[in-house]
Image (cartoon, rainbow, N blue to C red):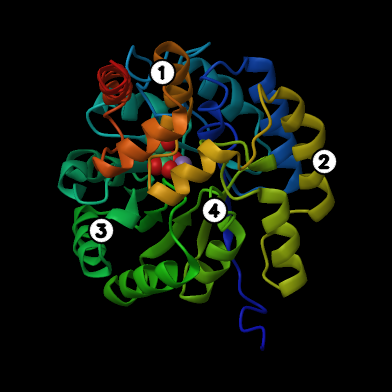
Amino acid sequence: MTNTLKGRRVRLHDMTLRDGMHPKRHLMTLEQMKTIACGLDAAGMALIEVTHGDGLGGSSVNYGFPAHTDEEYLGTVVPLMKQAKVSALLIPGIGTVDHLKMAHELGVSTIRVATHCTEADVSEQHVTLARKMGMDTVGFLMMSHMNSAEGLVTQARLMEGYGANCIYITDSAGHMLPHDVKEKLGAVRQALKPETELGFHGHHNLAMGVANSLAAIEVGCSRIDAAAAGLGAGAGNTPMEVLVAVCDLMGIETGVDVFKIQDVAEDLVVPIMDFPIRIDRDALTLGYAGVYGSFLLFAKRASQKYGVPAREILVEMGRRGMVGGQEDMIEDTALTLARARGLQAA
Ligand SMILES: C[C@H](O)CC(=O)C(=O)O
Ligand SMILES: [Mn+2]
């Protein structure tokens, strides 16, 4: 097979300090943020995302309280960057217009307005304002496996119409396979204006992070998310150091140094993991059953509390079609399963 990607250029966007907040229960220290961000910057990373795992304003009972505020994290990292730009995620309804203005004032250059993949209409206010403020404005369609190619085209066009200059197809559950990625991103690429960029955010629950990213590049994606040592929700994001090495071998330009990013992953990120980020049966189930990546730790906690295996809770969450924002239903589901077991046993 010929390598059709040789000579292509992609902008890599690092997720370690935002998606990586999920497995850290949002408790990264400022020192950890600083060290990792500086390592990524020195490795040549173009964009680095920093916030609570659920984006600006995520600090809450529903999502978890972080060790520091978004202001503290951003205020610490942004001034230290020599060449990297810093982005922030914002889910309308969790993050407000005031959060957006705060991030802009602190020097955040890219805002990623995230909605469920059928709800792009709720992004209008934040996308319009970000664009008015001159920010690199991204529409981020989460749980994209739950919408068809045509459906995603409609949602992407809405975000583009509000002013987004880049649209992301986000595989929040790590459920998509390379042929889905090609079909969905290919359709969205065709439908958007040529100057609107296309991005892909992968999770590694079915070990497809790198393969899916390459499929995305093949159909015209110019921005790709990944995290050093894969630190992210579920089995993690696409492992950045692996993606960089593969791109290098394929002649895809990333601007990131192959060995420096390996060292960031190995020396700075692996040591701060609370548990190994790997495809254990629960993370695999997220991918298999199409469940939101950040539900993993909630399901493990509910499993301990109610004595129902996390895998069963996750399968049931997938069957019920639960999406981001419905974290409270995990405990509810565990309780229902526990009661059903009790009744059966009785
Ligand atoms: C808030 C989520 O963690 C956003 C994300 O990274 C995803 O949907 O995947
Ligand atoms: Mn993610």
Relative vertical location of residue 342 with respect to residue 171 in this rendering, above or below: above
Residue 242 tag number: none
**Would you identify the image quadrant in which residue 298 lies?**
top left
Real-space CA distance between mark 4 and mark 1, rounded to the nearest whole angstrom = 23 Å
Real-space CA distance between mark 4 and mark 3, rounded to the nearest whole angstrom = 19 Å
Question: Callout 3: few (<14), some (14-19), or many (20+) C-alpha neighbours within 10 Å?
Answer: some
Q: What x and y, as percent, mark residue 110?
A: 44, 43
Real-space CA distance between mark 4 and mark 2, rounded to the nearest whole angstrom = 25 Å
Query: Residue placed at 72% from the left, 31% from the top?
Result: 269
Label 4 with label 1: CB-CB less than 8 Å = no
Sequence-first tag of 4 and 2:
4
Question: Callout 2: few (<14), some (14-19), or many (20+) C-alpha neighbours within 10 Å?
Answer: some
Task: Give whichever of 338, 203 is nearer the camera.
Answer: 338
Question: What is the three-letter code of the residue carrying label 2?
Answer: Asp
Real-space CA distance between mark 1 and mark 2, rounded to the nearest whole angstrom = 35 Å
Residue carrying label 1: 302
Real-space CA distance between mark 2 and mark 3, rounded to the nearest whole angstrom = 38 Å
Query: Residue placed at 62% from the left, 78% from the top?
Result: 5
